[in-house]
Image: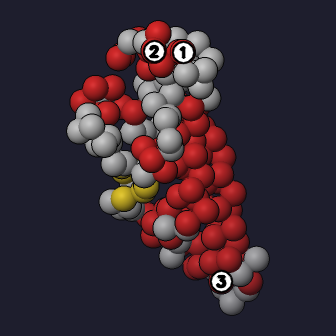
Amino acid sequence: MKNIFKGTDIMELVKKAKTLDAGKMFVEIMRNRLVQRYVVTLNTDQMRLDFMDSNGILLANIGGPYSPATMATGKKRSPDSVDLYDEGDFHNSFKIVNITRTSFDITSDPIKDDGTNLLVEWGRDIEGLTAESMEKLAALMLRHYTDKVKQHLGI
């Protein structure tokens, strides 16, 4: 049987589709500074707005609630609204590293001026995304993948 699509636009589209590289696209998307900023914002918002680590565990349940002295400053909503935000240095230190074809890492500078290591005190899971944040990132990634596929296919 003769290939009815030989030499047609559909055949050219199929050939281009076969050369799509999802891993390469992932790396390109994750190297985008706006995407990285979005991931960091998702991570820090989990702590600052939802008061939880990447497993969805309230920070107050990990390292304890704020002390009466901290509450007396008037900067915190409640003893359980632990957000690990004081001057913003820790939250501002978050960044995306080790981007591979299938993953990336979120890292930060967890050492406070007094030598306290926040990763030791509050757990390594303060760096990372909750399931809800991963869903938000997946929605953003889908839009980027769609654009990249269209660009690759020339449509």
Numbered badge on residue 12: 3
The answer to whether residue 124 is seen in the rendering is: no
CA distance for labels 2 and 1: 5 Å
Give residue 48's position: percent from left, percent from top. 56, 32
Give residue 90's position: percent from left, percent from top. 42, 44
Q: Viewer-nearest of labels 3 and 2?
A: 2
How many numbered discs sit on the rendered protein? Answer: 3
Callout 1: 10 Å neighbours few (<14), some, many (20+)?
A: few
Looking at the rendered image, the quarter that the C terminus falls into is: bottom right
Numbered badge on residue 54: none
Q: Quadrant of residue 74?
A: top right
CA distance for labels 3 and 2: 69 Å
Name the residue rendered at 58%, 36% in the picture.
45
Q: Please name the amino acid that badge 2 sits on.
A: Ala
Looking at the rendered image, the quarter that the N terminus falls into is: bottom right
Q: Of residues 4 and 25, which is closer to you in this image?
A: 25
* Image position of 98 with respect to 114: above or below: below
Give residue 69's position: percent from left, percent from top. 45, 15
Dots 2, 1 in contact, CB < 8 A: yes
Numbered badge on residue 72: 1
Q: Please name the amino acid that badge 1 sits on.
A: Ala
* Image position of 56 with respect to 9: above or below: above
The answer to whether residue 83 is seen in the rendering is: yes
Q: Viewer-nearest of labels 1 and 3?
A: 1
The residue wearing badge 2 is 69
Label 1 residue SS: helix
